[in-house]
Image (cartoon, rainbow, N blue to C red):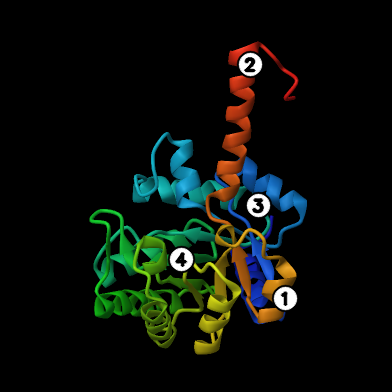
Amino acid sequence: MASQLEKAEAFKALHESDETFIIPNPWDAGSACMLEKVGFKALATTSNGFANTLGRGDGEVSLDEKLEHCRALASVTEIPINADFENGFADSPEAAAANLLKLAETGLVGGSIEDYTQDTSEIYDFTLAVERIAACAEAVSKLSIPFMLTARAEGLLRGVSDIDDAIKRLQAFEAAGADVLYVPGLKTLDQVKTVLDEISKPINVLAPFMPDTTLDQYADLGVCRISIGGALAHHVNKAALSAARQMMDSGSFNWN
């Protein structure tokens, strides 16, 4: 089994290479093993996909449940895994940073921190959002492994249609020490290029918002990392639901 240090170094190297890579999102240990066997070089958890396995919605998982989930995925895979760590399960910079260190103890080698809280459905004030990333960056810089911190500007995903504000936040997160920048909700390649032109750190793009865009097109622009969020978990559930309806409605098993 690869050590956490080996996984961390491999993950860091992926972000430093010229390769544009897909980082798909397993929702449990079995799906993580499946995606590793396909040949992906890294994985990322999905908060929505994992919550659904517990019969809950996004944002309804506890910190302890998230940490145990991450520990389970790390224990069955040889490749790096990044966590969708929501808002760090805390509002204050100090608490979010402390929780991120708990995440590092699970064997994962990266984590994404949002500037949005599910508890009140609000985007954090700009200053607080930056302070949170700065505290997280300082905390992980003291680890014995190169833990990759991803900072997420959630506005476009949460109804704030202001790409300039998203870029302002990404620039501040970059200056605060984030290793990767992520603005979910970009819907065109022009928007992606606009973001790329304004920052220097690697960016993550959420692919389901642009389903017709290919890996090569992202690579041509210089995108580093492409994730899919809960889309693959939803796709699997949709197929299972279709099969279940065939059995219930017609007694048919020809979906198999």
At mark 4, the secondary structure is: strand
The answer to whether residue 17 of the structure is visible from this angle is no
At mark 2, the secondary structure is: helix
Cα–Cα gap, marks 1 and 4: 21 Å
Query: Residue, x 63% and y 58% (percent of image)?
Result: 211
The answer to whether residue 205 of the structure is visible from this angle is yes
Task: Depth check: give the residue in front, 170 or 81.
Answer: 170
Cα–Cα gap, marks 2 and 3: 35 Å
Q: Choose mark 1 or mark 2, whichever is in front.
A: 2
- Specify which label sits upstream in the sequence, 2 or 3: 3
Left or right for 172, reference 187 = left
Q: Quadrant for residue 122, please give it.
A: bottom left
Cα–Cα gap, marks 1 and 3: 22 Å
Say few, some or many: other residues with alpha carbon within 10 Å of mark 1 (under 14 / 14 to 19 / 20 or more). Answer: few
| Type of the residue with mark 3 | Thr
Query: Residue, x 63% and y 75% (percent of image)?
Result: 224
89 is higher (above) or lower (below) than 132: above
Cα–Cα gap, marks 2 and 4: 40 Å
Cα–Cα gap, marks 4 and 3: 20 Å
Cα–Cα gap, marks 1 and 2: 44 Å
| Type of the residue with mark 1 | Glu
State the mark number for residue 77: 3
Query: Residue, x 71% and y 65% (percent of image)?
Result: 214
| Type of the residue with mark 4 | Ser
249 is higher (above) or lower (below) than 20: above
Q: Choose mark 1 or mark 3, whichever is in front.
A: 1
44 is higher (above) or lower (below) than 66: below
Q: Which residue is mark 1?
A: 19
State the mark number for residue 112: 4
- Specify which label sits upstream in the sequence, 2 or 4: 4
Q: Which residue is mark 2?
A: 247
Q: Are marks 1 and 2 in contact (CB under 8 Å)?
A: no
